Amino acid sequence: MTKRRPKNNPKPPQPSSSVAASDPTTSATVPGDDSSPPRTLASTKAMLERLPSLSRILSVLMLLLGIFAVGALFYKVMAGFFVPLFLAALLVVIFRPVHDWIYVQTRESVDWPLHRPR
């Protein structure tokens, strides 16, 4: 694992009153104004340092790609079994009452060859 650099968050230099008046990118804050202040180079660098590294992003993307590939291959292999399994479950639901009725009707009237009393 790589060592992380310590995060240095230097405060951007405060412009003097004469520079602030001539600089069009800075504006005086108005009470009640919710607009964000303009970005400076230092704040942009600080924001970029907080982002995850490229290797971490790539490893997460490769992990997601691998999971997707395994899922797609699993689906391709199992797709042939989904329809028969669904039809078997459907036939069980449909014919269970018929089986129960036949069982009740033939339980005592037919002497099965391998029937052993309990």
Image (cartoon, rainbow, N blue to C red):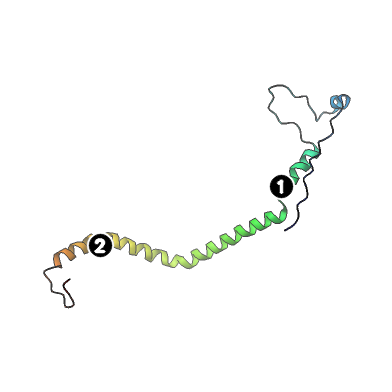
- Residue furthest to the bottom in view is 113
Q: Nearer the viewer, residue 90 or 29?
A: 29
Vertical placement of residue 65 versus 30, above or below? below
- Residue furthest to the top in view is 31
- Rendered location of residue 24, percent (x, y): 82, 28
Q: Residue at x 16, y 72 (%)?
A: 117
Tell me which amino acid carries mark 1: Leu
Left or right of residue 33, residue 72 in this image: left
How packed mark 1 is, by other alpha carbons closer than 10 Å (few <14, some 14-19, many 20 or more), is few
Query: On the image, which quarter does residue 48 sit in?
Result: top right
- Rendered location of residue 41, percent (x, y): 81, 39
- Rendered location of residue 93, percent (x, y): 29, 59
How packed mark 2 is, by other alpha carbons closer than 10 Å (few <14, some 14-19, many 20 or more), is few
- Rendered location of residue 108, percent (x, y): 12, 68
Left or right of residue 21, residue 64 in this image: left
Q: Nearer the viewer, residue 5 or 67?
A: 5
Residue at the spot of label 2:
95
Q: Residue at x 79, y 43 (%)?
A: 8
Q: Quadrant of the C terminus?
A: bottom left
Q: Which mark is residue 51?
A: 1
Q: Residue at x 64, y 56 (%)?
A: 60
Disc 1/disc 2 C-alpha distance (Å): 60 Å
